[in-house]
Image (tube, grey):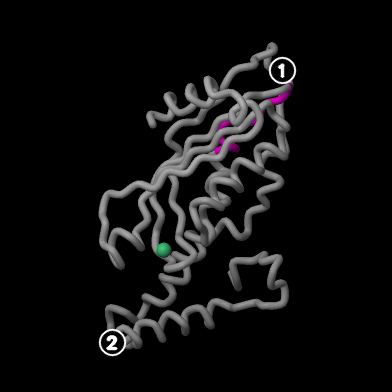
Amino acid sequence: MTSLAYRPAQPDIVVNKTDAEEAVRTLLRWIGDDPDREGLRETPARVARAFSEWFSGYSQNTGQILSKTFGEIERYDDIVHLRGIRLESYCEHHLAPIIGTADVAYIPRERVVGLSKLARLVDAYAKRLQVQEKLTAQIANSIEAALRPKGVAVLIRAEHHCMATRGVHKHGVDTITNQFTGVFREDQTLQQRFLTFSGV
Ligand SMILES: [Zn+2]
């Protein structure tokens, strides 16, 4: 892999793996260690591979994930709710992990999508540099655009390691963000049902 691929904002900038590994060596020197000692010799390559996994969302086309929908639902018209989807993301300010869960729900109008696709959508946005508010809105907006459902609800609760292990050092604090569209925004009873299912 030469780069994590598609970056619409910077299409001309391609960083190859050697450049990335050299950047890791620089950081290792900067923290006061020796990148040439035995234990660290393979570390730049391992870090580059780890980054490829942690930031694999950049090469995912989020528009395609929900492209296959199903219409045979016998007029099902209530909440479809995925609860507790494991969320692993990274803050764009410190590159520190954001670890938590996402709840994703919608009320179909005519069509539904494979349940695993909703979890894949969460991953595709999470495995990028993020702020939690934007991540929450991106997931909701994608479902809204793909399914045109009666409403979408997304709730993320996550611990930000940049806050837990540095700075104010507050461990065990969850940040909760919600985004509601359509009937979830308009109907307080529905919104409350979603929050009850989510355990908030
Ligand atoms: Zn941060």
> What stretch of residues is rendered in magenta?
110-118
Disc 2 marks a residue whose amino acid type is Gly
Left or right of 87, for residue 19:
right
Callout 1 secondary element: loop
Residue for point 57% across, 22% down: 79
**Other-residue count near label 2 (Cα within 10 Å), few / some / many at <14 / 14–19 / ≥20:** few
Residue for point 49% across, 64% down: 92
Residue 124 vs 145, above or below: the answer is: below
Left or right of 94, for residue 184:
right
Disc 1 marks a residue whose amino acid type is Glu
> Residue 186, position in %: x, y?
62, 27
Q: Quadrant of the image for the C terminus?
A: top left
Residue 113 belongs to magenta span: yes
What's the CA distance linking mark 1 and mark 2? Answer: 61 Å
- Numbered label attached to residue 32: 2
Residue for point 59% across, 28% down: 184
Residue 76 vs 2, above or below: the answer is: above
Quadrant of ligand 1 in image = bottom left
Callout 2 secondary element: loop
Residue furthest top in the image: 74
Q: Which residue is mark 1?
A: 72
